[in-house]
Amino acid sequence: MPNMRLDKNPMPAQDPLIRNGNFEEVTLGYPEAAAVDEAARCLGCKNKPCVQGCPVQIDIPAFIVAVRDGAFEAAYDVIAKASSLPAVCGRVCPQESQCEQYCVRGIKGEAVGIGRLERFVADWHMQHSEGSVAAPAQNGHRVAIVGSGPAGLACAGELARRGYAVTIFEALHVAGGVLMYGIPEFRLPKRIVQAEIDTLKKLGVIIETNVVIGKTLAIDELFAQGFEAVFVGSGAGLPSFMRIPGENLNGVYSANEFLTRINLMKAYREGAATPIKQVHKVAVVGGGNVAMDAARCAKRLGAEEVYVVYRRSEAELPARAEEVEHAKEEGIVFKTLNNPVAILGDDKNTTCGIRCQRMELGEPDESGRRRPIAIPDSEFTLDVDTVIMSIGTSPNPLIKSTTEGLEVTRRGGIVTDDAGKTTREGIYAGGDAVTGAATVILAMGAGKEAANSIDAYILGQ
Amino acid sequence: MFEILLNEKLNPTVSRMVVQAPLVAAKAEPGQFIILRVDDEGERIPLTVAEYDREAGTVTIIYQLVGGTTIRLAQKAKGEYLADFAGPLGTPSHTAGLKKVAVVGGGVGCAIAYPVAKRLHEQGCTVHSIIGFRCKDLVILEREFDAVSDVVKKMSDDGTWSAKGLVTDALKQLIESGETYDEVIAIGPLIMMKFVCKLTAQFGIKTMVSMNPIMIDGTGMCGCCRLSVGGETKFACVDGPDFDGHLVDFDEAMQRCAMYREFEAHERERACNLFTKEVI
């Protein structure tokens, strides 16, 4: 008999007012008993509705049944067949709008905590497995991957498991892409990312850091070196700004810069070589997951007041509900229906305020969300010393400008078909480089899809 | 890991390092830069390529000791390794088609100006170099400039080396004596580039400058290196580092460069103290 309890087993977490002063992981993961109990809530539906919500098609009921039976390593094997980064996805996937959205248990009560169970299984594996991964038999074909973020890692993992010799080229000094520079330690500990990458290395994946494709090497040179196909997962690119006065004042960061200083360069640590401003009153502009990460990092750097300034209402916030909830618990103040019109600076060119105007919602726009409209004469100033712009990115031009025949959209994203094939033979792409800023799991799904295409392409030749 | 083949002091505040980095050496062009980290705990800093040898696979950087990182860099010995060395980054300086150019270099900026002057000279362009330093002790690359220039004007702020005065004084004299240039290329401290641009604007001479703002990734991701050019926000790492100097907002760039000055002073002290301890 399944466990018919209506709500999920709660996720243990650090107390909000303690965690907002440290960078330790916020949620602590299920203990074994809770995991087994939660797994027993799964009805084991024959048609597996949850799987259609998973961009990498994990056989969810199969792994959950293994958890229920206490066969945690077997559960891991089920997940690992489909996902290259289970410990990452169990933490940062928006399960509520993917697998869990289709869970039958969600019709009356809460869906099964699929994400929490995935994390439990991945963490259990990391703690208990010997770490011995048998490198598969080589098939003699070579594939190059540009960028070691979630898209590149997923593509690499998939191909390596099929026997391809895979080399990933990474521009930064460490592998992981946005998992390392973007998502904060308290949401995704870097040792977890490192462990997942180590697993890929054991599969035979080679990672070359400090190689900027488009500069150090061009894609055509990779073909000349004997790579038969190239996957481009180079990520989102340059941060967007609002084009309002004051954006180049000292104390105005893009979210990318702010998060990179903290996550990649460890600027929050005493004695770090990379500096970050001492923040006191911070406005984060934007409402996505990146904005939540930036706001929560600012709080942890010691800011007394942190505002999220967003031009629509709370219902339209693009961030995951859980992130918004966590941010609120930690003392982040949401200033929704407010739009910045200028950032104010003092005589030393340092930020001292942000001028906003109040908004109201009108008719739905092309995104289907109600359009924010400025309320006349409603401007006011928030006293802040730091502004973090988190309103998206535009694709990096480096690869397009150095690869002939590679078409991009008007907005700069690489053009691909559904299977990740670009307009150049042998070149595939996926993740933010194609779609613009999206989620880790969508990038992984695209990487995996492209791996299928690359496999078919090379074997078909 | 990238092996250091040479690390020598050119003067009390400027050093030259030759690094084994074949992939960078194969592609580097004048005006481009690299990003390095000294060690695994280090910050990422951009430095302009001063020279490269494609056959030997080496890249030369010339750097001023300004903060903790450059001081640690100077403490590295031949045979040791740098943790990271990525590039070449940025857009190469545009030199094609130029027939007569005044190259203005100030201080350690001469290290960036030199490969541009050399490239122009190799193309058959007439090169008038104007190089300036605060004083005699800080002079670098004098012979190198002599070798690639048709005319060299040498200036020092205090008159201890060659002529006393600023590079702008020498440039003004050349222009007023009837010299005409397709372009002026000015590379040095922001304040110097600002005043070169003020001068050349009066005479309507196109002027390119090389901007060296604070960077982190250097590949078009973080947006830290942004500056205003003609009222638009540009990113030095991918749009530059060379820009039309008459359009650059130098005052803003100077203020942005000062953002972490206090931290840098503290780091400098820390690095120096460490050094003292090691020596004792």
Image (tube, rainbow, N blue to C red):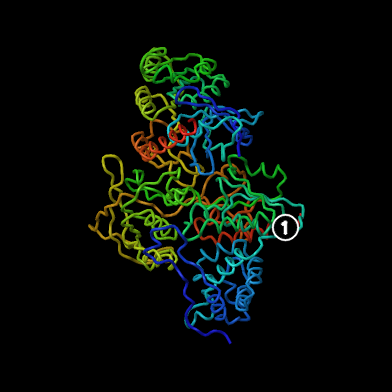
Residue A197: image x %, image y %?
61, 55
Which residue sits at x=40%, y=35%? B269
Which residue sits at x=70%, y=47%? A227
- Please say if B142 is above or below A115: above
Relative placement, left or right, of A58 versus A142 is left
Q: Quadrant of the N terminus of chain A?
A: bottom right
Q: Residues within 10 Å of mark 1 (few under 14, many from 20)?
A: some
Residue, far front: B280
Chain containing mark 1? A
Residue, far left: A377
In terms of secondary structure, where does tag 1 sit? loop
Q: Nearer the viewer, residue A402 or A439?
A: A439
Which picture quadrant has residue B88? top right
Residue A366: image x %, image y %?
43, 63
Residue A257: image x %, image y %?
44, 48
- Please say if B151 is above or below A296: above
Which residue sits at x=64%, y=74%? A71
- Please say if B31 is above or below A407: above
The residue indicated by pointer 1 is A135
Q: Quadrant of the C terminus of chain A?
A: bottom right
Asked if one can make out residue B97 in the rendered structure from this viewpoint, the answer is no
Q: Nearer the viewer, residue B9 or A111?
A: B9
Residue A96: image x %, image y %?
49, 71
Q: How many marks?
A: 1
Q: Amino acid at mark 1?
A: Ala
Asked if one can make out residue B244 in the rendered structure from this viewpoint, the answer is yes
